[in-house]
Image (tube, rainbow, N blue to C red):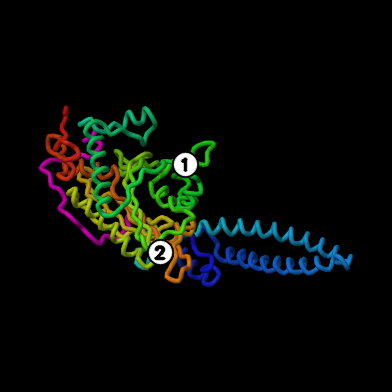
Amino acid sequence: MIDIKILRKNPELIKDSMERRGDTNVDIDELVKLDQDYLQLIQDVQALQEQRNTKSKECKDNPDAREEVKVIKVELAEKDELMKTLKLQIDEKMAWLPNFLSDDAPAGLSDEDNTEFKVVGEKPQFDFEPKDHQELGEALDIIDAARGAKVAQAGFYYWKGKGAILAQSLFFWTQMELVKRGFTLFMTPCVAKESTLFGTGYLPFFADQTYKLDGEDLSLIGTSEQTLVAYYGDEILNSAEFPLKSTAFTPCFRTEAGSYGKASRGIHRVHQFHKVEQIIFCKPEDSPTWHEHCQENAEYLASALGLAYHVVNVCIGDMGAPGYKKYDIEAWFPGFGGYREITSNTNLTDFQSRRLNIRYKDENKKNQFVHTISSTAVTDRVVCAIMESYQQEDGSILIPEVLQPFCGFDKIEAGN
């Protein structure tokens, strides 16, 4: 949520931000006019209330004052209704304003315009034609998308046998690594209220990606970011404890409306996936540092798993409305023949905390809004990257050394 004081003092700042994003959802001049009308109504109502109070004191000795009070009450009721209507219109339009952008967010329309700024690791080389994770998974009987579609629908799948062990080992190892780095481990609900989705910025911007439960004020979560950030909603946090670091492993549900083509082959873009998330609450001046901290964690995990990857500074057109600055890690997928996103790391500044009313007291004991960082640690996509990167000519898959103690085996091969 954008501070309405900025709209009142410097609407051009918001216009410039909207122009950078190519966002035309809100007419800022119209919004300014609505807000000015609303502020004028507040003054009118206050003046009428003062008149009513003055005249009410005269009613005992002045019959005419009684009639004047009645007229004032009618006018007050009308203006109160108009204020409510204007407030709803203003709130609805304010809800559609995206976050401001970092100065170094690259211009661009899609992920093709993201700017690479770091390349890490050697791409694996093969003496054979590498397979993609779907072909490998089917041959080894560790991924079953066909039965996922039979039981649910297309876009759902099963991890099976040693594939399930590998996935679970990755998620557990990741959580333990984050705990070592000071994160508090949570097990969160897998559903959230509409107010939670609004507060974290998923509504109204990503309504078409949300699975809503019929007859309930609940939707399946698209990420544990939603439940971890909203955990502190309407609270004043103790800044002496900053940064507050939270992590959780959850299933995540997204409709993935409009997904198709080569990039959707296999289980890279699906309706249900699994994720370990990093969430940080901190002071505004510290959020750039903690954004980089989450990036270091995500890159450590990718490097420890032996994956080749690059990091991109996400362009404006590929950045969600709540984001201020965002990095993606894209691992090299040999079977796919290109880099593919495995993690995202976003500094959301005070966009979520304003919506959820999450504050702290500064050195002057004045309430300020915290900043939040939301960063993927790992998802199922990382398992897919491992499969493609560690595949052998006979179709088997070696297990990264750091995961072998959790898996209890060092290779997945056919019939085993």
Residue at the image point whose x is 49% and y is 62% from the top: 2
> For the residue labelled by badge 2, is the local secondary structure a helix, a strand or a loop?
loop
Vertical placement of residue 56 versus 174, above or below? below
| Residue 19 visible (yes or no) | no
Q: Position of residue 8 (x, y in %)?
A: 55, 69
Total numbered labels placed on residues in the image: 2
Q: Is residue 37 left or right of residue 20?
A: right
Residue type (three-letter) at the residue carrying disc 1 = Ser
| Pick the front one: 143 or 363 | 363
Vertical placement of residue 242 versus 363, above or below? above
Q: Position of residue 11 (x, y in %)?
A: 52, 69
> For the residue labelled by badge 1, is the local secondary structure a helix, a strand or a loop?
strand
Residue 2 located within the stretch drawn in magenta: no
Q: Is residue 355 left or right of residue 253?
A: right
Mark found first going from the N terminus, 1 or 2: 2
Categorize mark 2 by other alpha carbons within 10 Å: few (<14), some (14-19), many (20+): many
Residue type (three-letter) at the residue carrying disc 2 = Leu
Q: Position of residue 346 (x, y in %)?
A: 35, 57
| Residue 285 visible (yes or no) | yes
Mark 2 highlights which residue? 101
Q: Toward which corner of the image does residue 414 lie, by quadrant?
A: top left
Q: Which residues are magenta?
A: 109-138
Categorize mark 1 by other alpha carbons within 10 Å: few (<14), some (14-19), many (20+): some
Mark 1 highlights which residue? 219
| Pick the front one: 268 or 235 | 235
Q: In which quadrant of the rendered image does the C terminus lie?
A: top left
Q: Is residue 45 left or right of residue 102?
A: right
Front of the two marks 1 and 2: 1
Mark 1 in CB contact with mark 2 (< 8 angstroms):
no
| Pick the front one: 108 or 181 | 181
Q: Position of residue 378 (x, y in %)?
A: 28, 47
Residue at the image point whose x is 32% and y is 50% from the top: 184
